Image (cartoon, rainbow, N blue to C red):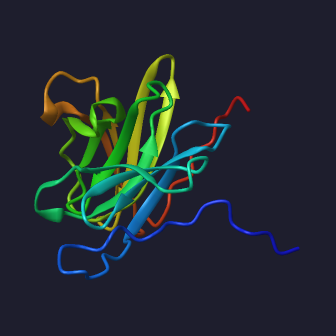
Amino acid sequence: QGKSPIWQARNRPDDELDIKVPIFDTGVTECDPGAGRILATCTGYGEIRHYDIRAQRKVVSNAQVTKDNMLLSHIARSRINEHHLYVVTQEGHPIVVDRRLNCRVIRKMPGSKGSVRDIQLIANNGVELLMTGGCDRHIRLFDQTQESQKDCCIGSAYLKQKINCLLITDPHE
C-alpha cells in the first residue's frame, strides 16, 4: 500500500536575487520521542533547522551553527537532556548545541581526524557517551562532561575496515 509521507523538506524562501535556495539536509532526528511532531535536521550549509509537522510542515527555526557554512554531517538527540543535540562537522569534530538557546554551541569535542560516517549515543547511569566511527578506521568514545576539551575523547580503537555505520545494543534487553 502506497502511503503518503508525513513530512517532506521544503525549500527556503528565495534569496535577495530571487534565486531558489536548495535544501541540503544531511541528517534528521526526532526532538520529541514517541510523538514525532518536531524534527531537527542538519544541513550542508552549517544550519540546524527545526520542523513542526503539526504547523503546516514549515521551518519553525533556522540557526547557523558553524562559521563559513561548514557542512554538518550527522545529528542525534540527547537521551538525557531533551534540549541538547549532538552534531558532527565536516572536520569530524562533534559539538553539542542547546535547542533552547537557538542552537548555540555549548561544547566542542576535538579528537576525530577525518570524516565521521556515523554517531551513536550511549546512556548509562546518568552519563551520556558519544561514539563516532569514520573513514580514519577509528571508533572514538567522547564524554562531554569532562572539564577540559582535549580530555573529551576518553577512548579510541583502531579497526581494520573503514567504518560505515555503528550499531550499539543493550546486553540487558
Q: Is residue 15 above or below residue 153?
A: below
Which one is in front, 56 or 163? 56
Does 104 appear above or below 28?
A: above
**151 with respect to 82 (left or right):** left
All told, the count of numbered labels is 0
Answer with left or right where residue 111 lies relative to residue 36. left
Please tell me which residue is depicted at 13% across the width and 36% down the height of the picture: 150
- Whole-percent x, y for residue 126 in the image: 47, 17
Residue 42, placed above or below residue 60? below
Q: Position of residue 154 (x, y in %)?
A: 28, 34
- In the picture as drawn, the residue positioned furthest to the right comes out as 1
Tell me the quarter of the picture where residue 43 sits.
Answer: bottom left
- Quadrant in the picture for the C terminus: top right
Residue toward you, 137 or 134: 134
Q: x%, y% of residue 157?
A: 35, 49
Residue at 29% x, 74% y is 14
Of 15 and 167, which appears nearest the observer? 15
Q: Extreme top residue here?
A: 125
The residue sitting at 28% across, 56% down in the picture is 47
Image quarter of the N terminus: bottom right
Return the residue nearer the eye: 130 or 154. 130
Q: Quadrant of residue 59?
A: bottom left
Quadrant of res 26: bottom left
Give percent across and percent down for residue 55. Answer: 56, 48
